[in-house]
Image: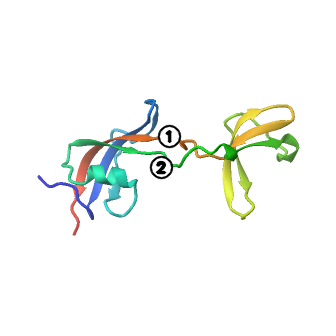
Amino acid sequence: MPTAKKGDTVLISYTVRTSDGRVVGRTEDDDPISLTLGNAEIFPEVEAALDGLEVGKESSAVVSSDNAFGPRREEMVIDIPRAQLPDGQAPEPGMTLGAQQQDGSTVQLTITQVSDETITADGNHPLAGEDLHFGLKLVEIKLAA
């Protein structure tokens, strides 16, 4: 039976969990994703776990936070005076805001706390500081030409 190798396009099903077991991503049972091994379309640790795998077989991979979304950085958590917020919808925890940085790029901030005078917003990726545990199943291999 053929095994997946660099250059092959594969269909996979997966579940991603944090170290505490919380599910943070998954494919639907009947809707696997397609990717080409060696094209850097997914974390290298996941590609390595798929390399040599046969159709129907399962594998796992762990992607450390440093190789995933980076460490959690407390300097990315900021307090913003409510007077600086745009008029309109009242801020609530969980809402996101776009903010322009000094270099002109945009960062997404998630509101974590709201008080009368300020809001606290977090610019970290929601999975920053989390090791990601992938459960993988190889559904199909489309052999490289």
* Labelled pair 1, 2 in contact (Cβ < 8 Å): yes
Judge whether 68 appears above or below 143 on screen: above
Reply above or below: 47 against 15.
below
Residue 111, position as x, y percentages in the image: 71, 39
Q: Amino acid at mark 1?
A: Glu
| Residue drawn 85% across the image and 42% down it | 81
The residue at 21%/62% (across/down) is 143
Q: Which mark is residue 130?
A: 1
- Estimate the x, y position of residue 13 in percent, counting from the top left: 33, 44
Taking the image as shown, residue 22 lies to the left or right of residue 116, namely: left
Sequence order check, earlier mark of 1 and 2: 2
Residue 68 image label: 2
Residue depicted at 31% across the width and 60% down the height = 37
**Which amino acid type is marked by label 2?**
Ala
Quadrant where the C terminus is found in the figure? bottom left
Alpha carbon distance from label 1 to label 2: 8 Å
| Secondary structure category for the residue under label 2 | loop
- In this rendering, position of residue 78 left or right of residue 1: right
SS for dot 1: loop
